[in-house]
Image (cartoon, rainbow, N blue to C red):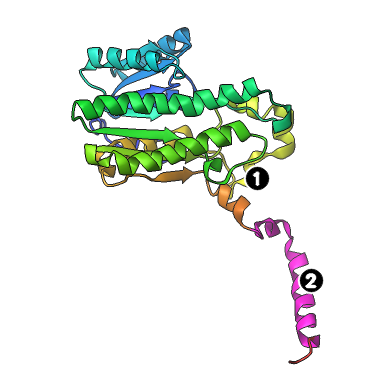
Amino acid sequence: MYKTPLLEKSALKEKTILITGGGTGLGRSMAKGLLEAGANVIITSRKTEVIRKTAAELADITGGQIMAVTGDVRKYSDIEKVLAAGIDQFGAVDALINNAAGNFISPTERLTHKAFDIIVDIVLKGSYNCTLALGKYWIEHKHNGTILNIVTTYASTGSGFVVPSACAKAGVLAMTRSLAVEWAKYGIRSNAIAPGPFPTKGAWTRLFPAELAEKLDPKRRIPLNRYGHHQELVNLAAYLLSEYSAFINGEVITIDGGEWLKGAGEFNWLEMVPGEMWDQIEKSIRKRSKTKPSS
C-alpha cells in the first residue's frame, strides 16, 4: 500500500540530509521517512521550539539520528552556521531538501510589496542561499551531493491569486534545471518534486478555510478523487535522494493525481455532461452531418 515506506531501512544509511522547514507538514513527514530509511537528518527553521520538539519526537519514533538547528533561510550566514553544525555532528552533509515555503491566496492588487517580498525571500532567496552554501561546500571538498527542491505544479504554468509563490517557485525550478547541467561535473544532482494537494495542518487551512474548501471542493479537481497521502511524497523524495535514482538529473516530477492535466485539457470539463445528454448531443451531431451540403 502507498502508506508503507518504499525503501528498506538501510537504503540511506550513513547519508546526512538537511531539510529546511522540517519541523511541520511535509517537511516533518519527509524527515520521518528519511530517518526510517537510515539517514541522519538535520531540520532547520526559525521556530526553535517547533523543530526541537519535532526532532525529539521523531528520534523517539524512529530511533534515528536527528538534530534541530535554528536558522533563517533568508540569511546566508545562518545557513553557513546550520551547515557547520551538521558537519560537526555527522562529519558531512550529503543532500539538501529545499522545502521551506510560504504562500497565501489573494488578488495580486491587494498585496503590499512587503507581502510579495516575504514569499519570494523565503521560497526563492531561501532556496538559492541553501543551494549555494551546500554547493560550495561539496565542490570544495570534492563531495558528491544531491539537491531536491519542492516546487509546485504551477511553477511551470503560473497561476493567478498566488503570484508571489508562482514567481518564486518558477525561479527555483529554473535553478534546478540550470544547476543539473552546470554542477553535474562535480557529482551534484539536482531534481524537483511538484506536489499537488497534500493536506497539512496549518498551511492547508490557511489556503483553504473551511467555508472556501466546502464551496470549491478541491478534491473534485483531481481525477483520482482523493488527496495525496504524505507517505506517497515521502517515498518519491527518498527515491530521488537515493542511489537508485543516480541517473535522474534535472527532472521535475509531478505527484498530484492528475490534477494539473485535468485543468490543462480544453475539453476535460465535459465530464460534467450526464449520459442522457450525450445521447442528445450524438443525435444532434448526426443530424447536422446529414444536412451538411456536399462539396
In the picture shown, does residue 203 fall above or below 72? below
Cα gap from disc 2 to disc 1, whole angstroms: 26 Å
Please state the horizontal and vertical placement of residue 233, each as a whole percent of the image: 43, 36
172 magenta-colored: no
Q: Tell which of 164 and 291 is nearer to you.
A: 164
For marks 2 and 1, the one nearer the N-term is: 1
In the picture shown, does residue 68 fall above or below 145? above
Q: Within the image, what quadrant is residue 57 found in?
A: top left
Q: Within the image, what quadrant is residue 216 found in?
A: top right
Q: Which residue is mark 1?
A: 220
Q: Which residues are magenta?
A: 266-291
Image position of 54 (left or right of 271):
left
Image position of 224 (left or right of 127):
right
The quarter in which the N terminus is drawn is: top left
Residue name at image x 42 percent, y 13 percent? 71
Residue density around tag 2, few if under 14, some if 14–19, many if 20 or more, within 10 Å = few
Could you tell me the amino acid type at mark 2?
Answer: Gln
Residue name at image x 73 percent, y 27 percent? 110
Q: Which residue is mark 2?
A: 280
For label 1, the SS is helix
Please state the horizontal and vertical placement of residue 179, each as a whole percent of the image: 35, 39
Q: Within the image, what quadrant is residue 118 found in?
A: top right
Please state the horizontal and vertical placement of residue 160, each as a whole percent of the image: 66, 39
Residue name at image x 79 percent, y 81 percent? 288
Residue ranking furthest to the bottom? 294
The quarter in which the C terminus is drawn is: bottom right
Q: Residue 215: in sight, yes or no?
A: yes
Could you tell me the amino acid type at mark 1?
Answer: Arg
Pointer 2 with pointer 1, Cβ within 8 A: no
Residue 164 — which label?
none
Image position of 55 (left or right of 228):
left
